[in-house]
Image: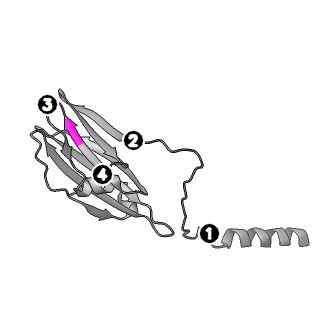
Amino acid sequence: MMRTFAFSALLLLVCLAAPAFADEQRVRIVTASHLPQAAQLETVYAGKCGEVRYKLAVSQENHTVAFSADGMTDVDLSATTVGARLLEEDVLVHVGFNCPRQAVNIFLKGVKLVDLGAPTGFRDLITVRLNGEVSNSLPRSERLDELANPRMAQ
């Protein structure tokens, strides 16, 4: 009888106990190696709109972000907010494209990691016309939980 009561009391305590929640923690990410690092690395995003092939090349070493398409000279996007985000260290970013008439929209959705701090979210959009004209970019800060929303930057 006493054992049944003790077991019932223990079970009741477990069931009524407040649920456990993880505390917010800060993470430090350190990357290092004793091995020689590769040089002249580029991240290249490439695609095709109709018959036009395009390429967005990001070079951290040269601090350049260049957009090119068939039949047009390279367009330097390094000075835009899109270029600055792609060149930042400690940024995790998704790059997306769509193709309005005679142009390419470049969308960024990402997270800026902060050493011993909370990460911040962002979105950005820029349009490059096939004649080389670049529109103003549309940067905006986002809460991390808003980044899952597929809406575009406005």
Residue drawn at 55 percent across, 63 percent down: 28
Disc number lying in front (1 or 4): 4
Q: Is residue 34 left or right of residue 138?
A: right
- The residue under label 2 is 40
Query: In the structure shown, which secondary structural element does the residue marked by tag 2 occupy?
Result: loop
- The residue under label 3 is 71
Question: Residue 44's spot in the image, x, y percent?
Answer: 33, 39
In contact (CB < 8 Å): disc 1 and disc 2: no
Query: In the structure shown, which secondary structural element does the residue marked by tag 4 occupy?
Result: strand
Q: Main secondary structure of the magenta part?
A: strand
Residue drawn at 27 percent across, 41 percent down: 56
Cα separation between marks 1 and 2: 51 Å
Cα separation between marks 4 and 3: 25 Å
Q: Amino acid at mark 4?
A: Leu
| Magenta span of residues | 67-71
Cα separation between marks 1 and 4: 37 Å
Cα separation between marks 2 and 3: 25 Å
Asked if one can make out residue 149 in the rendered structure from this viewpoint, the answer is: no
Q: Nearer the viewer, residue 35 or 119?
A: 35
Quarter of the figure with the C terminus: bottom left
Cα separation between marks 4 and 2: 23 Å
- The residue under label 1 is 19
Residue drawn at 15 percent across, 56 percent down: 136
Q: Amino acid at mark 3?
A: Gly
Disc number lying in front (2 or 3): 2
